Amino acid sequence: EVQLVESGGGLMQAGGSLRLSCAASGFTSNDYAIGWFRQAPGKDREGVACITTYDGSTDSPDSLKGRFTISIDKAKNTVYLQMDSLSLEDTGEYYCAAEDGVYYYCSNGAGWYPYWGQGTQVTVSS
């Protein structure tokens, strides 16, 4: 069974940086896709970045490119989300999600992923 464990959230001042980690296990395939999502109170869950392990393809919304960077350490089966220049609007619960298998692309749509972690809270203060 696929298991995902997020870590690295916390309280950060605006302008600072955080790196989130998603430790993944239990895949039946050697390859998979991981997406990072966030949800602020009263708002819909939104995708912030995704990556495939097969060829390292990534994708993220244009609004976050340049501030959020996704990467993977395949040997550790851990995906990272580096978040820079944090703003108050980045506050929310951050989740990683996974799809098992070989993919040449990934999706920032929540419905694409069947497996989800429990989330880690990120709070940005002024």
Image: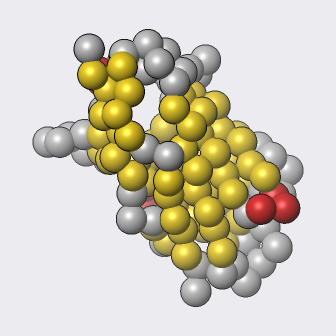
Residue 72 position (above or below residue 60): below
Q: Quadrant of residue 123?
A: top left
Residue sitting nearer the eye, 120 or 70: 120
Q: How is the image coloured?
A: secondary structure
Q: Quadrant of residue 39?
A: top left
Work out whether residue 46 can be spotted: no
Place of residue 90 in the rendered image (x, y in percent of width and height, measured from the top left): 35, 28
Q: Taking 17 as reference, is 10 left or right?
A: left
Residue visible at 27% across and 22% down in the picture: 125
Residue visible at 73% across and 63% down in the picture: 77
Place of residue 78 in the rendered image (x, y in percent of width and height, measured from the top left): 69, 57
Q: Taking 81 as reference, is 42 left or right?
A: left
Q: How many marks?
A: 0
Place of residue 92 in the rendered image (x, y in percent of width and height, measured from the top left): 30, 40
Residue visible at 58% across and 79% down in the picture: 2
Residue visible at 26% across and 14% down in the picture: 126
Residue sitting nearer the eye, 84 or 114: 84
Place of residue 50 in the rendered image (x, y in percent of width and height, measured from the top left): 61, 46
Q: Quadrant of the N terminus?
A: bottom right
Q: Taking 60 as reference, is 105 left or right?
A: right
Work out whether residue 88 can be spotted: yes
Residue sitting nearer the eye, 122 or 38: 122
Q: Quadrant of residue 4?
A: bottom right
